[in-house]
Image: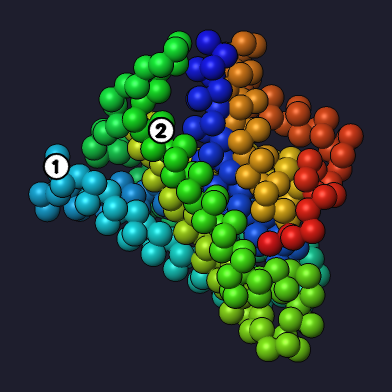
């Protein structure tokens, strides 16, 4: 039973970690909590349903379904990245030198705008993922693992590994330099505006993939899912140490495990509460988060 809950927790935690990375990257660069990031995840879920419906209607089903899913992921990431880029240029860049409360209010405004935008364009009712897949069960010991759960865990691990390796590239080093000191980064030839835009684009792309994974896992989505997912991902980022990429990964996985085990052994009705209780304890004991004090690389 415990092993089963660990698998369920890893599935959920991987999604939280992917969303939390967007929060922590933006905070590492701008020291801004992008509360509209959860809505990008929600848009990813909706766009995944829309594009998959389009591709399956064109005949890419059954044996061709992996191709349809791949095209869906690529198109969703592209569109959500465009949303992230536009969000930064419209809502945050004009307020870059404003009092710190101003961009925070702007982020909340963008969040409300995107929620209502999706509600008006897609309707207030739940949307169903158009094609169920990954229902094959893999059984070992006392664990029942579906192919979809395995795909989510593997995809999350690959994305986190890819982002870790990206840090070692020229662009990744430029991001870390910008996070440490924007003025000095600009003096050595780094285009700070480009780096900030790229941070939003990468974070939005990761949120898009998380949205598709959740839509396929639960089968339905609605316009309000971004709020709670955003709050939990923010909690995961703070839990691990906001501004730290390894911290966001660790915090997301821990959050998923806490929720899954708490729901199984205490009560599923309060599964959204357990994470915040643990967060409160962590903040009382270690305000910087689990890895906040040890990580030298913020982004």
Left or right of residue 286, residue 47 in this image? left
* Residue drawn at the location 69% of the way across and 30% of the way down: 275
The spot of residue 209 in percent (x, y) is 43, 50
In the depicted structure, whether residue 157 falls above or below residue 176: above
Which mark is on residue 63? Answer: 1
Q: CA distance from mark 2 to mark 1?
A: 20 Å
Which mark is on residue 150? Answer: 2
Q: Are marks 2 and 1 in contact (CB under 8 Å)?
A: no
SS for dot 2: helix
* Residue drawn at the location 53% of the way across and 10% of the way down: 1
* Residue drawn at the location 87% of the way across and 39% of the way down: 286
The spot of residue 244 in percent (x, y) is 72, 53
The answer to whether residue 114 is seen in the rendering is no
Residue 136 occupies which quadrant of the picture? top left
Q: Residues within 10 Å of mark 1 (few under 14, many from 20)?
A: few
Give the mark nearer the N terminus: 2 vs 1.
1
SS for dot 1: helix
Residue 22 occupies which quadrant of the picture? bottom right
The spot of residue 103 in percent (x, y) is 70, 65
Left or right of residue 134, residue 296 in this image? right
Which image quadrant: the C terminus?
A: bottom right
Q: Residues within 10 Å of mark 2 (few under 14, many from 20)?
A: some
The answer to whether residue 142 is seen in the rendering is yes
In the depicted structure, whether residue 97 falls above or below residue 273: below
The residue most toward the left is: 59
The spot of residue 140 in percent (x, y) is 41, 16
* Residue drawn at the location 73% of the way across and 56% of the way down: 243
Type of colouring: rainbow
């Amino acid at each position: 039973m415990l092993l089963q809950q660990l698998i369920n927790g890893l599935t959920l935690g991987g999604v939280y970690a992917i969303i939390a990375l967007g929060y922590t990257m933006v905070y590492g660069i701008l020291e801004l909590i992008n509360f509209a990031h959860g809505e990008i995840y929600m848009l990813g879920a909706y766009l995944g349903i829309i594009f998959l419906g389009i591709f399956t209607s064109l005949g890419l089903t059954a044996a061709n379904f992996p191709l349809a899913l791949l095209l869906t992921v690529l198109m969703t990431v592209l569109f959500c990245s465009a949303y992230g880029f536009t969000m930064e240029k419209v809502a945050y860049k004009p307020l870059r030198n404003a009092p710190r409360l101003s961009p925070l209010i702007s982020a909340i405004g963008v969040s409300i705008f995107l929620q209502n935008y999706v509600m008006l364009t897609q309707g207030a009712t739940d949307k169903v993922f158009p094609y169920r897949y990954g229902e094959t069960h893999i059984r070992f010991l006392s664990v029942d693992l579906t192919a979809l759960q395995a795909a989510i865990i593997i995809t999350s691990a690959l994305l986190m590994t890819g982002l870790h390796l990206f840090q070692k590239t020229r662009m990744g080093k430029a991001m870390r330099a910008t996070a440490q000191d924007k003025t000095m980064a600009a003096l050595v030839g780094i285009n700070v505006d480009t780096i900030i835009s790229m941070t939003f684009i990468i974070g939005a792309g990761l949120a898009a993939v998380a949205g598709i994974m959740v839509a396929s896992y639960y089968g339905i989505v609605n316009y309000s899912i971004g709020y709670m997912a955003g709050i939990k991902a923010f909690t995961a980022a703070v839990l691990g140490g906001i501004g730290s990429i390894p911290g966001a990964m660790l915090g997301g996985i821990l959050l998923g495990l806490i929720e899954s085990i708490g729901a199984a052994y205490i009560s599923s009705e309060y599964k959204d509460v357990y994470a915040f209780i643990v967060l409160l304890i962590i903040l009382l004991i270690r305000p910087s988060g689990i890895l906040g004090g040890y990580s030298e690389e913020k982004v």
